[in-house]
Amino acid sequence: MGFTSFEGLRNGMGGRVAGRSVVAWVLTTALAAGATGCGVEELPLEEPGSAPGTVKQALEQYNGLSLNGLSLNGLSLNGLSLNGLSLNGLSTTDFATWFNGNPAGNEQLMRYMVLCAVPANESRTFRNPSTGLVYTWQGGMGLAPDWAEGAPATLVEQQVISACLAAHANNYGLHVPISLLGRDSKEATIPFSSEEMATFARKESCFFGNVFKNEGLFAGNDRNALALDESTSRPCGLLGFGLLSNASCSQVQRVGQCEQHCTLDPNGTFYTQCTVNGVQYKPLTTRIRPQDINRCGDGVCQQGERCGFGITADSCLLDCGTCVL
């Protein structure tokens, strides 16, 4: 398959089958990650009475898409080194201290961290010594199997997890399905199907960077840009010409067009490496559905559109009306 702070079917540590699994996380808070796609119904969290003292995300797997919803506003681990974090043992005092500094935000971060790093048939569990709550985070993509099993994160694992977190970022708190393409830390191609490529027909972005080493996160447009009347509900994704900075996604630095910094695989499907500031990174490439492109004039004022007197996304009178001072 192809972290809000973490969008082929993958079985086991190395086994894969055609297509890819999709994880839908359903949470009840505005910043929580989770969504449905392809007409699948959202699932609620377990009721407290069903498993006392347990916090466990509802999970469904759908073939051919991934889900974003991560806010990277709090992507600092406040003293806990990501490179020193073992996903195979979350019982240390340092982890508990960090987690309880911001339980809601850090639970969200861990959910997507595990989703990106750990295979779909595995999960990771943390019992909070301060509250007694038990958190279970489900794996999904298996991009960093060695780190997931407790080994120190290699440089490649750091980069591919960072790219995965950036690709799932959505500071609007909205849940938009994406297709995520590229290679994992073992250089295995993330499985995809022709149906997936047809459904997610609009090329979107490349994402790369390294938050483990505080080198930042980067994104660019994948060989196209939004027209003047177009926008999306993914502020870290595809932008229009000239919109190379975006206050709605300040944690991810824009680099213009992906092809200016990145190398495509031989089939032209996804980017295999990107270079910025003299550093080479392993990226992930995203695609979106054509129906997730918003257009000024469709009668609905959506995230990414603004009020004004024109017919462009930045000044859309028809959808958002005039601005009230």
Image (cartoon, rainbow, N blue to C red):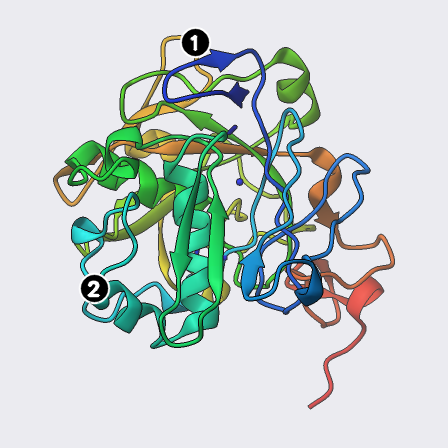
Question: How many residues crowd around disc 2 within 10 Å: few (fewer than 14), some, or many (20 or more)?
Answer: some
- Asked if residue 33 can be seen in this view, the reply is yes
Vertical placement of 183 versus 32: above or below? above
Vertical placement of 121 versus 293: above or below? above
Cα separation between marks 1 and 2: 40 Å
Which residue bears the numbered disc 1? 267
Answer with the quarter of the image where residue 93 lies. Answer: bottom left
The three-letter code of the residue at mark 2 reads Leu
The three-letter code of the residue at mark 1 reads Asn
Q: Residue 151: horizontal and vertical position, in percent?
A: 18, 37
Vertical placement of 106 versus 190: above or below? below
Q: Nearer the viewer, residue 133 or 318?
A: 133
Q: Residue 126: horizontal and vertical position, in percent?
A: 39, 57
Which residue bears the numbered disc 2? 80
In this view, the residue farthest toward the bottom is: 325
* Residue located at (49% from left, 29% from top): 121
Q: Residue 118: horizontal and vertical position, in percent?
A: 39, 35
* Residue located at (30% from left, 37% from top): 148
* Residue located at (30% from left, 54% from top): 90
Vertical placement of 235 versus 41: above or below? below
Give the position of the C terminus as an image quadrant: bottom right
Label 2 element class: loop
Instruction: Answer with left or right where residue 63 lies relative to residue 106.
Output: right
Label 1 element class: loop
